[in-house]
Image (tube, helix red, strand yellow):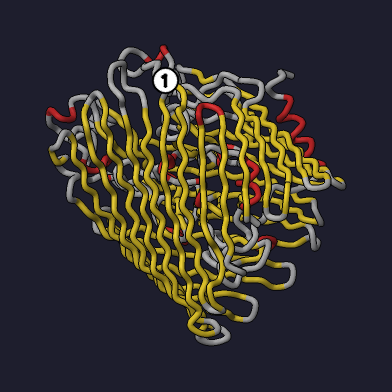
Amino acid sequence: MTSAFKPLALGLAIAAAFPSTIAFAQTDVAGATANVVITAGRQTQAAKDVLADNVVITAEDIAKSGAASVVDLLQQQRGIEIARNGGPGTTASVFMRGGNNAQNVVLIDGVRIGSSTTGGATWSSIPLSQIDRIEVVYGPLSSLYGADAMGGVIQIFTKKGTGVISPTVSAGLGSYGTRKLQAGITGSVASNLSLSLNAAHEESDGFSASKPGAGTFTYNPDKDGYKMDSFNGRLVWEISKGYELGASVLHSRSNAQFDAGIGYDDRSISTLETIAVFGRGKFTDYWSASLQYAKSADKGYTDASYGKSQIDTRQDSLSFQNDIRIGKDVLQLIAETREENVDSVSGGIPVAGINGTKRTTNSFAASYVFKQDAHLASASIRNDRSSQYGSNTTGSVAYGYRLSDALRVNASYGTSFRAPTYNELYYKGYGVATNKPEKAKNAEIGVYFEQGSTQFSAVYYQNKATDLLVYVGGNDAQNKPYCPSGPEYAYGCARNVNKATLSGLTIGGTTRFADLTLRASIDIQDPKDDTANKRLARRAKQHGTLAAEYSFANAKVGVETIYSGDRYDDAANTKVLGSYNLLNLYATYEVAKNTTVLARWNNALNKDYELARNYATAGSNVFVGVNYGFK
């Protein structure tokens, strides 16, 4: 057995012997209690009753992770792989269960974010310093969230105010000239009025994003750093018992350097904005409803040696949700509308076919959650009608049975789709206006165990995707050209031609022996391009984690390992990205009430590895910080 694979073998052994995987979160919404999951059913559910496979990252997990970015934090979770063109601040992708970055939905406090031109979230603009909790729900969720929820949904919850008004402050220093500072106030300013205000600044001198092998038009030996400023505010007014109004806002701006050859300070400026106004009411003992109007913006400005460009996506949405209780069951009825607007300018000239375009999607959904004795079940159906790509109906069903109070088995089936991006539809020489949504059908079975401090889950899934959009040229099997006629398509275009099967086994567990906590996870998967009979690019056959934490007095010390098998950097499977095994060490100490010091040593063995071919990753690095007021 290779030394790189030993942590996985040990992790699997621990997972098999000491059940779990789901790290449950503390509540961060009004009316929720401990050990709940919100995203899986668009309602507050006890974690033990949630049929969808999920992971919750708590505020404590975030604090001790010492992660430089949201992407680094997600890399530590099962079922997730990442790719990135350099260090924090550079272009990154998140793959859930083998799906690509555009095949998952990302929400911040219920507000959808992302780029309509490239698809998926712009991860470099999401400020980790503003996050209180993250819920990761795996599998098809289009029947609840609409387009793009093929691999799953990641919902980010920002800091919120509860209890007595109190300040929070954190500061830290690390390798590569990293500096971080955050300050805020949270709590209730009156018996019926709560608020949260948080501001943060972080920056790093960084390291060269590229390696010499990237070539003349990419490699630059200079340091590629970044700066990010962010602000988050939330105000909630309880009008009377059971009725509340609120508003939230998030703004972040990242200014990051990247490499596009020697002799120019290439930069990417990413701005993320979300604004939401919402109201919730419990009108009877059986009926509650919520109404939310939200706006989000994903703005990207690039100043590079090859030119300047600005690409902005704006989304406006209105959502009306009704929850009707029928005994222990819940019937949910949802109506939504979302408008996407795109502005794109390159070299000072509007991009033909994309600039000023918009599309509207009107959606209706219904779901039913059943709970009776040892039986758990859910069913949902949704129709999304787009002004651009037409009508799509998706659905899902799930059933679980409790073999005992601690042990449950379940199975589910669901359909999903991904909307074509504006680039795949309209970009000159690439997009084709008649392109259709991608489709997928997913089936999975799982076993879940929870007893005391021991938790375990094992899930096998198979997600078959069709009509995948890929760049293609030439003729099809009937000798008909894939692309429309015209010189702009001389080399190819984006078309719905590929099929893929994303299958795998994902296992995770955690247990505690007195003051020692053990956690482990392993993913054994086969993300396959069925059309070419190749593995999907930048996906490993195996990846996993193993961690141990020991608590004593006012301190905690921990060790983590992250393992990934080899991957291919290209669709043809000719360029290999080697396997890697990372070792991280950390310690926390409560020096006084509400004051904690953190020290973390990432990549302690100074492993040289790649997440994208000829792009660098951080070597051995340390971070030291202090947190005051965090609970």
Residue name at image x 24 percent, y 43 percent:
425
Vertical relation: 429 (above or below) 615: below
Q: Position of residue 318 (x, y in %)?
A: 35, 67
Residue name at image x 30 percent, y 46 percent:
299
Vertical relation: 103 (above or below) 450: above
Q: Position of residue 426 (x, y in %)?
A: 21, 42
Q: Badge 1 local density, few (<14 within 10 Å), some, or many (20+)?
A: many
In the rendered view of the protein, which quadrant contains the C terminus?
A: bottom right
Vertical relation: 137 (above or below) 570: below
Vertical relation: 89 (above or below) 63: above
Between 118 and 126, the one lying in front of the other is: 126
Q: Is residue 287 visible?
A: yes
Q: Position of residue 576 (x, y in %)?
A: 50, 18
Reading the image, the residue beneath label 1 is 210
Q: Is residue 135 visible?
A: no
Between 305 and 373, the one lying in front of the other is: 305
Residue name at image x 33 percent, y 34 percent:
268
Q: Position of residue 238 (x, y in %)?
A: 50, 79
In the rendered view of the protein, which quadrant contains the N terminus?
A: top right
SS for dot 1: loop
Can you name the residue that lies furthest to the front here?
592
